[in-house]
Image (tube, rainbow, N blue to C red):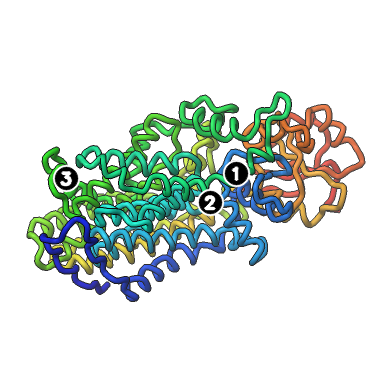
Amino acid sequence: MRLSPPPPTLDPARTLSESPPVPKVRLASLLTISLLWAAIYLAGMFTPALLDDVDTIHAEAAREMVLGHDWVTLYTDGIRYLEKAPIMYWGVAASYKILGVSDWSTRLPLMLGVLALLFATYRLGQRAYGETGGFYSAVVLATCVGPYIFTRFEIPDVIVGLWLTLGFCFFLRALDEGTPSRTSCWGFAATCALNTLTKGLIGLVFPFAAIAAYLVLTGKLRFIFKLRLISSTLVFLAIAAPWHILAAVRNPSQGAVRGFLWFYFVNEQFLRFVNKRVPPGYDTVPLFIFWGLLLVWLVPWAVFLPQAVREAPRRWREMRSNLSTRQSANLLFVLWVLAIVGFFSFSTRQEYYTIPAVPGMALLVGGWLAKEADPAADPSYRRAGKISSAVLFFIVAIGSLLGIVLLLTSKVPAPGTDLADLLVKNPADYDLALGHFLDLTPQALGAFRGPLLGAVVSFVLGAGLNWFLRWRERPRLGNAALALMMVGLLACVHAAFATFSPILSSQQLAVAIQQHYQPGNVIVVDGEYHQASTLQFYTGIPLQVLHVPSGNLWYGSKFPDAPRVFETQESFDALWTGPQTVFLWTDQDDPKELHGASRFLLARRGGKSILTNRNLNR
C-alpha cells in the first residue's frame, strides 16, 4: 500500500492567529479508503435478513413513518415510539421513499454514514498528523472489529462517532485560527445539534466534556469565550430545536400519561443513566468487561495503542506549554475516549456504547503509525512497532491453535439440522447486544467450520506477514498486510453471522405466514413485540402481542388513541377458538398459553415456531 511522505514540519515562527496549512485531499487516499469500505461494508449490505429486536423495530419505525407521512412522531406497530432521536429513522425512511423497502435499502444509510465517518477521520487525521497520519487513521477505523460488528444492525452509535469527528475537526481548526472563524464555530455547533438529533443529550455531553477537560488542562479556559457563543447557540437551536418542539406539541400529556418531554428527556436519558428507567429492560455490562471491550473493538490495531497514547502530553507543565497541532490533537483524542468510557462507567451500559470512542483511538494509532513509517523517525518507533507486531502474532498463534482444535473436534451438522437445536439457551443474557452468541456450544461450532478456517488462515498469514515486514524495516507494507488480513477476516465474520442469523431473525417464519395469510387472519406474538418484530416488517401486517405492555411499546400504549394490540389470556383463548385463522409465533416447544388446545405446526426455524389453530398444510 503506497503512501505519500509526511508534510514538511510547520514553521515555529508561525503566529497563533494563522491556521497551519492542512494537506490537500489526495485522490489516491480517498480511493483506497473507499475500496476498503466497499470490500468490508458494502459487500455485506445485502445479506442476511434483518434481525428481530432493534434491527426491525427501527426499520419498522421508518417504514411506518413513510406510510403515515409523519416525520415527527415515530410509530411501531401503530403505537407511539418516542424514546429515540429521529435522524437515523429519517435516513432510512428517505431511503425507502427513493429505493423502496428492502434489506439493503434499510442498511444503505448506515453504510453511507460509515463511509462519511472514514472520510471525516481521514480529514481530521490530516489536520492533526499530515497526509500519512490521516490516511492511516481512516484505514485503522475501516478495518477494525468494533464498528463492523455494530453496523450489522440498525443502531446510531457509528453516526454519533461521525458528528464527534466532524465537531473535533472544527474545534482543532478553531484552536489553530487563534480567533475562530464563523465557519469553525458554527460548524461545531451544527455537529452538536446533529448529534443531539441522533442520540439525545449525549450529543452535547461528549464533545463538551472532552473540550472542557482539554481547555482546563491546557490553561486555555478563556478560549471558550472566543467561540461566538451567542451566534453558535442560535445555530444549534435552529437545527436541534424544531423537532423537539414539534414532538412535544404533538405528544402532550394526556390525563395520567406524561407527555413527550418527560418521557424523552427524564425517563429515557436521565433515569436511564441512573438505572431507574421505567420499565427496566436494559442489562449492564460489568465494568471491567466494558473497558476491556474497548480494546477488542480496535483489533488488530489495539497493539499499537499503548505507544500511541504515550505520545499525548502527560505532565501538567507539558500541557501548559505551547503545544503543537499534533500534541494538541493527541491530548484531545485521549480526552475524547476518556469522556465516553468515563461517562458510561457511572451509568447503565451495553457493549456498543463505546463505539463513538473508536474513531478517537483510530486517530491516535494512525498518527503513531505515520511516525513509525517516516524514514527519518527515531529508531525507537521502529522498535516499538516490532515489539507490538510480535505481541500480535503471539496472540494470534494462541487463538489459531484454539481454532484448529475446534476445527478438528467439531463435526458438520447433518443436512437439515436446525442450528438452534445445537445451542444452549441463556435467556438471562439476551438483554446484552451480543448475548445470543453465548449460546454457542462445541457441537454448534461445526456449522461454522468454513468461516473458522478462513479466520485462522487470515489471522496467521496477516499477523505473520506483518511481523516479518516490520522486522525487515518495512512498516508500511506491514500495515497493508494487516488491512488485507482484516478484509478476509471480516468476510469470515459476515459468513458466520449469516449462518447464525436464523437464531436472531424470524424472517423465514414471516415468509411461511405470507404463503397462507388471508385478510382477517391474526398474527400473535407469544412474548414481547421485539422478540418477533421481523414478522411485521416482512409481512407488513400489524402484530398482536400476548404479553402485558412492556419494553418499546410500554409508553405509547398508554395513549388513548393507541391501537389495541395486547391480548390477555382470555382474549387470546377467544381468538384461538374463533373462526379466524391465528398464526402464533412462539419460542416455546409447548406454549402454556394454549392450555393443551389443538395446534398445527406451520413452520419452525431458529428455535422459533409458527403454530396455527387450523391445519393449513392440507
Which quadrant of the structure image shows residue 591?
A: top right
Labels 3 & 1 near each other (Cβ < 8 A): no
What residue is rendered at 66% in x and 44% in y?
A: 73
Question: What secondary structure is marked by label 3?
Answer: loop
The residue under the point 78% across, 38% down is: 563
Where does label 1 land, which residue? 53
- Describe the element under mark 1 as helix, strand or loop: loop
Q: Kindly identify the amino acid type of the residue bearing the numbered disc 1.
A: Asp
Q: Nearer the viewer, residue 586 or 431?
A: 431
* Circles 1 and 2 in contact, beta carbons < 8 Å: yes
Comparing 282 with 576, the one in front is: 282
Q: Earlier in the sequence, mark 1 or mark 2?
A: 1
Residue 421, image x and y in percent?
59, 44
Of 361 and 205, which appears nearest the observer?
A: 205
Q: Which residue does the numbered mark 2 point to in the structure image?
A: 153
- Point out residue 500 in the picture as x, y percentages from the top left corner: 53, 51
Residue 519 sits above or below residue 354 on the image: below
Task: Quadrant for residue 533, please give it.
Answer: top right
Name the kind of residue labelled 2 in the image: Phe
Q: Which residue is mark 3?
A: 313
Secondary structure category for the residue under label 2: loop
